[in-house]
Image (spheres, rainbow, N blue to C red):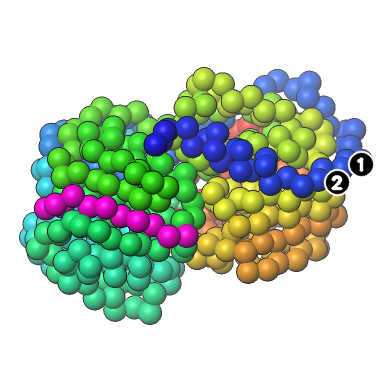
Amino acid sequence: MSAPHTTTDASLSATDAVVSAPHTAADASLTTTDAPLTARVPGSKSITNRALLLAAAARGTSRLRAPLVSDDTLAFRGALTALGVRVEAGPHDAFWDVTGTGRGPVGGGGVWCADAGTAARFLPPFTATGRGTYVFDGSAQLRARPLRPLADALERLGATVRAEGDAGLPLRVDADGLRGGELQVDGGLSSQFLSGLLMAGPLLRTPLTVTVRDLVSRPYIDMTVALMRRFGAEVTEEAPGVFRIGTGGYTAVDLPVEPDASTASYFLAAAAVTGRTVTVPGLGRDSLQGDLGFVEVLRTAGARVDVGEDAVTVTGTGRLRGGFEVDMGAISDTFMTLAAIAPLADAPITVRGIGHARLKESDRIAAVAGNLAACGVETETGPDWMTVRPGPVRPALIACHRDHRIAMAFSVLGLRAPGLGFDDPSCVGKTFPGFHAELRRLFPE
Ligand SMILES: O=C(O)C1=C[C@@H](OP(=O)(O)O)[C@@H](O)[C@H](O)C1
Ligand SMILES: C=C(OP(=O)(O)O)C(=O)O
C-alpha cells in the first residue's frame, strides 16, 4: 500500500465528483493585487495525538517537534500522564519528549478524555493491551458520540468492556493483554475505531488481521499506517480494507509535526473569498493529511491553487464559482469551511457523503443549516448531504454548539458578511486557541 500520498487521493475524489460548473457573475470589487499573506497554522491534532500514543507505546524516548498545543492534545497528553507515561515539554512547547515503556500501561485508573474523540477511540485499545481496570469518561458532548463498535471489537480480542452510556462513555475496560487473530470492524460511523485498533496491534500477543467494512474518512487510516511505520511497526494492507499487523512493537523516533490541514482550510478559504493570496508553509504534497485535498474543492470553486513541495498557496480570483456537487466523505472536517462560504458563490453548491459529520462535536449538517438559516441563506439537507443556495447574508448570532469548526468556518464567512457574532468564540480552543487573533492579524478589520 502506498500510504503517504493520501492528499492526492482526497483531491482526486473531490474533483472527480464535480458534475457541472457553469459560471455567471464575478465580483469585480475583489482584486489580487494585495501583498501575499503567510498564515501561522499550528500542528496537526491528528498527528500530535497519534504520535503521543505511538511514543507512549514505543521503547525509548521520542521527540515530537512543534506539537499542537490545544484542548484536544492537552487532554490526550494528560490522559497518558494519568496512565503513567512521562511527557516533558521543551521551552515554549517547541517539542515534547515522550518516554515509552514498550508495552501497554499497568495499574489501572480513571482516564479523562474531555472533548477529544481521538482520546476516547485511541486510548481504550492501548490500555486493553496492558493490565488493570481503566474507566474512561469525557464531556457530555463526547459521551453522546458512538463507541460501541470499538467496545465490541476489544471484547472479541479478549478484554472485558462495559459501556455505561447509551452511545459509549463512560467505558470500563478490564485489561489483561489482548490476543490477535481475525477481527472485523465497522468503519461506517468513524474511522477512529479502526485507527485505535491498528495502533494497539503491535502490542498484541499474536499477529492481528483486521478487516474493515464501510470505512469513512479513509485518509486518516493512511495517516495511522504511515505513522505506525515511522515508529517501526510492521503493518501491511493485504487487500483493500484488510490490515495485518506484526507483534514487534514500536521504537522511539524524532518526529516533526506538520501544520494542521483542517485548520489551514479556514485561511485558504479566506484567500478564496477575499481575493487575496494565502500561503501555509510546512504543508506540501507529501503531507500525511487528507484534508489538504480541500484545496482541490477551492480550485473547483475558482481559486488558484499551488501545492508545492513544502507549502500550499491559494489565491482568490475575485469570484466564487458554484454549480457543482462534491463528495467530501473523505475530508468531512472541511465540509463546513465550504458550506459556510457557499452563499457567496454564483450558483448552488451540494456536498455529499457527510452523514458521519452528524456524529462529531455537533450534528454538523444541522448546525451549518441552522446558522445559514439565521443568516437568511437557503439550504436543503438530507441524511448525508446538503445544498447551499447563494444569496445575501444578513447579520446573525452564530450558534457554535461548542464546535470549534462551526466557529472557525463562519468566521471566514464573516470576512465578507458584516455583522456576524458568535455565542461561544473560545470553543476554537479545541484545536487552535489563537485562531481569532491569527485571522485578525491576516485580515484586519
Ligand atoms: O483519526 C483522526 O484523527 C480523525 C478522524 C476523523 O474522524 P472520523 O473518522 O470519525 O470521521 C476526523 O473527523 C477527526 O477530526 C480526526
Ligand atoms: C471531529 C473532530 O474531532 P475529534 O473526532 O477528534 O473529537 C474534529 O476535530 O473536527
Q: Which residue is mark 2?
A: 346
Q: Can the viewer see residue 95?
A: no
Q: Position of residue 288 (x, y in %)?
A: 44, 35
Element under disc 2: loop
Q: Position of residue 92 (x, y in %)?
A: 32, 32
Can you tell which mark lies on residue 402? none
The magenta-colored residue range is: 204-214
Q: Quadrant of the N terminus?
A: top left
Choose between 179 and 101: the one closer to the eye: 179
Figure quadrant of the C terminus: top right
Q: Position of residue 353 (x, y in %)?
A: 61, 57
Give, as a three-letter code, the residue at label 2. Asp
The part of the image, by quadrant, that contains residue 32 is top right
Q: Amino acid at mark 1?
A: Thr
Residue 145 as seen in the image, left or right of residue 332: left
Q: Dot 1: what SS?
A: loop
Residue at x 82%, y 27% (from the top left corner): 31
Q: In the displayed structure, does residue 238 sit left or right of residue 293?
A: left
What residue is shown at x 74% (from left), y 59% (from top)? 387
Binning the other alpha carbons within 10 Å of mark 1 as few (below 14), some (14 to 19) or many (20 upward) gives few
Question: In terms of depth relative to the viewer, which is nearer, 136 or 190?
Answer: 190
Q: Contact, CB < 8 Å: mark 1 with mark 2?
A: yes
Q: Is residue 7 above or below residue 84?
A: above
For label 1, the residue is 24
Q: Earlier in the sequence, mark 1 or mark 2?
A: 1
Residue 10 appears at what percent x and percent y?
Answer: 56, 41
The residue drawn where x is 66% and y is 62% is 385
For the residues labelled 1 and 2, the Cα–Cα distance comes to: 6 Å
130 w.r.t. 291: above or below: below
Find out whether residue 212 is within the magenta segment: yes
- Left or right: where 66 falls relative to 171: right
Residue under the point 81% across and 57% down: 389
